[in-house]
Amino acid sequence: MANNDIKEALKVGFPLFIGYVPPAIAFGILAKSCEISLLESFMFSAVVFAGASQFIALNLLMTGMGPGGIILTTLLVNFRHFLMSTYLSTRIGKMAKRYIFLLAFGVTDEVFSVLSFTKRKLTKTFVFILQLSAYTGWVSGTVAGYIMGGFLPEILTKSMGVALYALLLAILLPELKTSAKAICLTIASGALNTILIKLDMLPDGWNIIACILVIAFIGSFFMFQEQGEKAYG
Amino acid sequence: MDNLIPLILGMAAVTYGPRLVPFFLVGGNELSQRADTFLKCIPIATIGALIIPDVFNAVPDAPLAVVFGMGFTLVYGFWRGGIIIPVLGSVATTYLVLLVTV
């Protein structure tokens, strides 16, 4: 059974590994252009492991913001993971505490998305191998981007800006294909986020949290009647 | 540039905390059906807001290239699925559009 876990995790994990490389390369290139060291760029990806908020941190660093402000912003931006882990905690069965400490580290937007759309049971072997694949792609891509950044044409570097979004969309698409309600919720969430950003009332990152709460609340109303169909699980 | 290690460790701590805590709050408890449905809607709601509208600034000053790049992911991913080709293809498409328009 554990063997089966490994095989299936690698099948899902390899595409995630590859999918993480282009955005990671983009991060490595940006880090180098900010004149931070290779070790620090590596540490960003290896210790924080947080996709989008790493880009935000570098941009804030360039504006001259101090560490306190950047850490606070990171907390606000990444607080959405609280909701993701809440969802995952209901899917991941009981397991020893030491594994929870390890698995919680790898709850990125992308890993979370893949896990949440996986119909199978989320065993620790499956989750851990999936996270390790994502982590390897993210960290190695960062280092690769830092080292070869200077040799890539600027237009190609710019193009990699879409990679993180394409990765999320690619993960989401199979779900959208099977449910018109899922399409409605996705678009509604994006529309609400656009409005909230225009209104500019909440601090960075909290627009997304507001969207998640409001849209999931609305969604829970019209998904509620169809338990037989097993909304998303 | 100053030593960034303290900043990185601080960012790591505030990122890890929210990822870890819920496992100890919810873990093992039975949820009402209503709460369960709410949680099941979180992935979709999250990805929608993560992509829209930020994606249009993914390549500064080139929303058209983004539309084509993501358009490739949408069309190919919808018909054929997968991750590798939709992601690499979107970068390639964006690259080609930038080459032609810039």
Image (cartoon, rainbow, N blue to C red):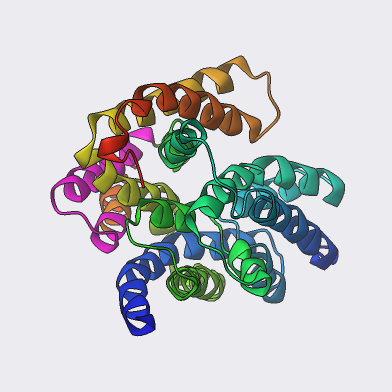
Please state the extent of the stretch shown in magenta in the rendering. B63-88
Residue A47 at x, y percent in the picture: 68, 68
Which residue is depicted at the point 49% across and 39% down? B39
How many callouts does the rendering have? Answer: 0
Q: Main secondary structure of the magenta part?
A: helix
- In percent of width and height, residue A226 lies at 29, 30
Q: Is residue A38 left or right of residue B4?
A: left
Q: Residue at x 61, y 54 (%)?
A: B27
B89 and A219: which is toward the camera: A219
Position of the N terminus of chain A by quadrant: bottom left
Residue A125 position in % (x across, y down): 46, 76
Nearer the observer, A60 or A207: A207
Relative placement, left or right, of A14 versus B52 is: left
Residue placed at 32% from the left, 40% from the top? Answer: B65
- Residue at 43 percent across and 32 percent down: it is B52
Can the viewer see residue B97?
A: no
Q: Is residue A207 left or right of residue A116?
A: right
Q: Is residue A29 left or right of residue A162?
A: right
* A216 w.r.t. A15: above or below: above
Q: Is residue B64 magenta?
A: yes
Q: Residue A123: percent from the left, percent from the top?
A: 45, 69
